[in-house]
Amino acid sequence: MFERLFRKHETYLLIIIIVYSIVVTSVNKSFMSFENLFDIIRGSAGMGILAMGVLVALLSGGIDVSFTAVAISGGYISVRLIMATGWSNLFMAFLISCVVGIAFGTINGLIISYFKLPTLITTLGTLNAFHGILTTFVGTESVNAREMPECFVRFGSAKIIKLANDQGGTYGLSVFLIPLIAVIILTWFILRFTMLGRGIFAIGSNRESAVRAGFNIKAIQMFIYAYIGFLAGVMGVVAVSEVRWVNPVYLVGTELTVIAAVVIGGTKLTGGSGTILGTILGVGIVRILYNTLVLLGLSAAWNNFFVGIIIIASVAITSYRNKLKAYRSLTFRV
Amino acid sequence: MFRLKRLRGLDTNLTILFIILVLVVLVLTAFLPGKFLTGRNLKSMAFQFPEFGLLALAMTLAMITGGIDLSVIATANLTGILSALIMTHYITPDVSGSFSALIIVIAIFIALLSAVVCGLVNGFLISFVGVPAILATLGTMIFYSGIGMAITKGIGVVGFPDSYLAIGSGTALGLPIPLIIFIVVTAVVALILRKSSFGMNMYFVGANPIAALFSGININFTILKTYMTTGLLAGLSSVVMISRFNSAKVGYGDTYLLQAIVVAVLGGIDPYGGYGRVIGVVMGIFILQALQNAFTLFGFTPYAKGLIWGLVLIMVMIINFITARYQERARISRMLEDRRFNNGVGNDADAVAP
Amino acid sequence: MSNEFLKVENVSKSYVGVKALDHVSMTVEKGKVHCLVGENGSGKSTLIKAIAGVIPIDDGEIIINGKPYTHLRAIDSIREGIQVIYQDLSLFPNLTIAENISLNQMVERRKKLLKWSEVRSFALSELDKIGISLSVDDLVEDLSMANRQIVAIVRALTQGTRLIFMDEPTTALTKKEIDSLFSIIMDLKEQGISTVFVSHKLSEVLEIAEKIAVLRDGKIVGEFDTAELDTDKLVYHMTGKKIEHTTFEYKGREEEAGPLLEVKNLTKRGNYEDISFELHEGEIMGITGLLGSGRTELALSLFGLNSPDSGKININGKRVHINSPREAVRLGISYVPEDRHHQGLFLDQSIGNNIIVTVLRRLLNRLSFISELKKTAFIDKYARELRIKTPSLGAPVDSLSGGNQQRVVIAKWLATDPKILILDGPTVGIDIASKGEIHNMITDLAGKGIGIIIISDEIPEVFHNCNRVMIMRDGKKIVEVDPKSTSEEELYETVKKKAAAAGRY
């Protein structure tokens, strides 16, 4: 049993996280405090939600880079609409954002499933297209904390557990954890317990066989990209509530980091292989890294440097092992 | 995955591209009388596009080998920052002209050298370690921009000597220097692709890396050299870019990444590798530059431009998809005909058994 | 009429003006084993896809169990009980055996949710029906070819199947596994399930089939009882020609001439063990044995893609270490791979480019650029020498037939002036008429002094074209035989017996 455990990618990720945490804590004790951990969780919720979407896309053998544009579109439109109509209601916020998200996601799905275009380049195109639509037709004014509708502000500061710290202030476990966990469970359920989920794996594993087995490829792909849009919509609300301001240029540019996190988590770019746990751990590594760099005395300017190194190291190791396997078994198939 | 079949009748596609270019110019001249087709405007375009053109060429090379280089912009930024730092550090107002010239030369050399190193890392990851090009250049893109960020903290490096600015804004023989650089580089790249064994190896590796291996081609070195070249081109681009902007900063040219891919695909480069010609990419660059210029004249925001490029990219791919479908059917019928032709068989269905 | 399960009546299908199927009529009876034979391009796969409802037909009817269809859909075909096992098996390598077996079932029954216990128990019970036990939680990508085949068959049987098409099922199987497959087909027959077996291995076809349908150029030449046919007659129907066999005559060598290639005690763990042989100029040595005997692995070691653990390789008396295909080419070794499409050719590139890919260095002029003149000269020379028939050498190589494509591969290697030419399965997937021509070409090359190794599992091929045959089994060299001292049947028996004695499970 132990041997099987050690062959799993997730085990190594967990070990890395544990070792790294120990090292950081020895340098700066405040890493292991509840306050810091809660902070990490609060900051990870957005990336985690998006990462679930990326996971689904990668499992099907495709990729989607447009989700940040979708997310910010959903969030921004939601804020502006609520400001305009005065319906300051969190449920409305999510509803509007998710509708926008699903709409954009469906466009992706239509293009990809009907024209069978390469997913990377297509979603690169829609990333720019969606962002352009948002900024051109909706506007580019930012909305700051004072103007932000109440529902977002309350959402952003609500806590599940409240505790007091030494300086007399309070901190707590953010409610962002709830949508995050909900999304994780939903994604897990779809992937593991529905034929739809099996279809996603099948397409990523061997597309031609999936066709012959009778899977409705077009419908499944439509679902995948619409689902990503839905998740992006959820994340949009979380993101604007988290920082309590919104500007249409926010978020776009971070998509590759999310993808990197999912890949670090062990999901294969070629499709058919990847786990929810791995994705969570991958996001965890990236977020912990962001968090600890500050604690170690490095400014946020170093974020990309270290994330870049981790990505390179992680994909290098996985790819090299795959390459050795292919050469040893004389398959040579790339 | 659906593979874009090679566009048969290459010359027809280039002709179509040329016609599109001419049409675009005509239409824009009509819509922007006195603004588009003026000497001043053309001259300013000739200063603007070469830095992008070099990046597009870099992307083209990577795509011909079946890969992609997402890190070209980050590489250009980083190398630009490095050479900028050298120049601003060593060239103070009191140094002599010849010393200043020496430093500039060193700075440019460092820029190019570091760019080649960046490309070398990419090439090594992709060929020897076996990392898929998307992932490798994704990682290096983040890493290189990270280095640049860590060095500059996001602040631009400014204060170049006037003699350096001449690169980006000066002319020689009546032509803008960036344009001259672009023309020379394009000619060299085209020559390499068409006429050198390195170039042909690139096409073979892109078309079918396994068959290339089995044919005795050294695929690792081919890929290594390819990405070193893309790095070099990115470095050249940075030399021009920072001269024109008179500063070096993380994030310059981010929009160029999508545009480089658009231009490559528009110019007939197959994203799956093994096909495409420089002349097509050059025409794509011209079309893109003309449109970009027109958009600016029309007053579009950068986002609106991004919107249009996104749509253009998708449209071009859809058109490729449709043409490829027709060609697939034609191919099947040709194949069946060849078999009949070579078996030399007629309608012997009623032949009597021996 | 009631013992007919499937009746194809006057079906036609065209692609852009060329008839892939031309008024094809065929019957499959219940509980019988049929074989469909035809050359590449005869329309076999088109016919199967039409029956499976994967492609639409232009004309005619497909009558299944009495029900006529003019517009058959895949789901109809499946519901009527027709299953196709394609050559690639259409499995999902990243999924478990249990999932692969149960998935089709679930799709067809339009299930939305999964119960994993159901998935597993279903798979286990289906495997039980054939009397095979496998660990259903294993990933398919970790299985051997034979086990994958079993998973594919079990999957095909789960849906009330009445007719199974098997497309070239035996290409990757050992003899014992082929026997198992045949006994499974017999079991199916007893259950009233028909099998249509598509194969180019005529000996197998004659062994297992009860009725044989022959396709040629999109038309059915005839449907015959197996008793009426033998190999020659079958070949005649498939090609419309009588095929002559010519035998290779080795010219012999001078007394002191040392061996061109010497392999001594070559070993690679898991692939082959203690292999020793010699090859002289002008010889054609055959290496045969069933799949898994280590033949291709040995060849790849000679070509630089599979470094041996121990042993020596000498070329013209000098010891060599071959670490990459480039080095192999430099040493004068050429390898024509079995997987023509992925390893041998650049399908989208022109015929000309495919020929010169190995010799770019030789086309350089003084400025180190490729000289168009030299390039065209090279291409024309080898296209002529190998008689590659095509309207244009600039056309992409995937527009050629299998036989012509193989000539292109051989051409590109001849261009390197090889001393040693290794051909792995040189006539696999090539129409019978072209086979003979390629064999003639190979024997001509031997006449020019090249040392040739042919790796093949077609006994007639090595029997008629080699002056020596080495039989391998399980990575070991068993024996070297001189074809002249034996007969084709005896050779066949030797190979079969030696392998059977291995007991490969």
Image (cartoon, coloured by chain):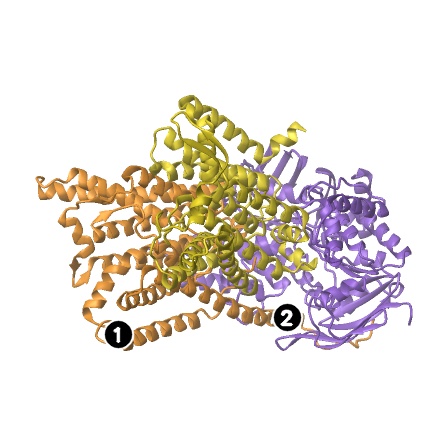
* Discs 1/2, front: 1
Q: Quadrant of the C terminus of chain C?
A: top right
Q: Residue at x 46, y 26 (%)?
A: A32
In the rendered view of the protein, which quadrant contains the N terminus of chain C?
bottom right
Which residue lies at the image location 58% right of the left edge and 52% below the top edge?
A60
Q: Amino acid at mark 2?
A: Leu
Of the chain colours in the picture, the one used for chain B is orange
* Position above or below: B352 against B193: below
For disc 1, the chain is B
Q: Is residue C450 left or right of residue C23?
A: left
Look at the image and give the colour of chain C. Answer: purple
Do we see residue B195 in this rendering? no
Question: Up-down: is C199 above or below B154?
Answer: below
Q: Earlier in the sequence, mark 1 or mark 2?
A: 1
Any mark on residue B32, and which? 1
- The residue located at (91%, 55%) in the rendering is C190
**Left or right of residue C273: residue C352:** left
Q: Position of residue A297 (x, y in %)?
A: 34, 29
Label 2 Cα crowd, 10 Å radius (few <14 / some 14-19 / many 20+): many
Disc 2 secondary structure class: helix
Horizontal side, residue A159 vs residue A329: left or right: left
What is the secondary structure assignment of the residue under circle 1?
A: loop
| Residue B119 visible in image | yes
The amino acid on which the numbered mark 1 sits, given as a three-letter code, is Leu
Front in this rendered view, residue C201 or C254 = C201
Give the labeled residue for mark 2. Answer: B336
- The percent position of residue C427, horizontal first and vertical second, equals 67, 57
Q: Position of residue C434 (x, y in %)?
A: 67, 64
The colour chain A appears in is: yellow
**Residue A34 percent location from the top left of the image:** 47, 29
In this view, C380 is above or below A97: below
- Label 1 crowd (10 A; few <14 / some 14-19 / many >=20): some
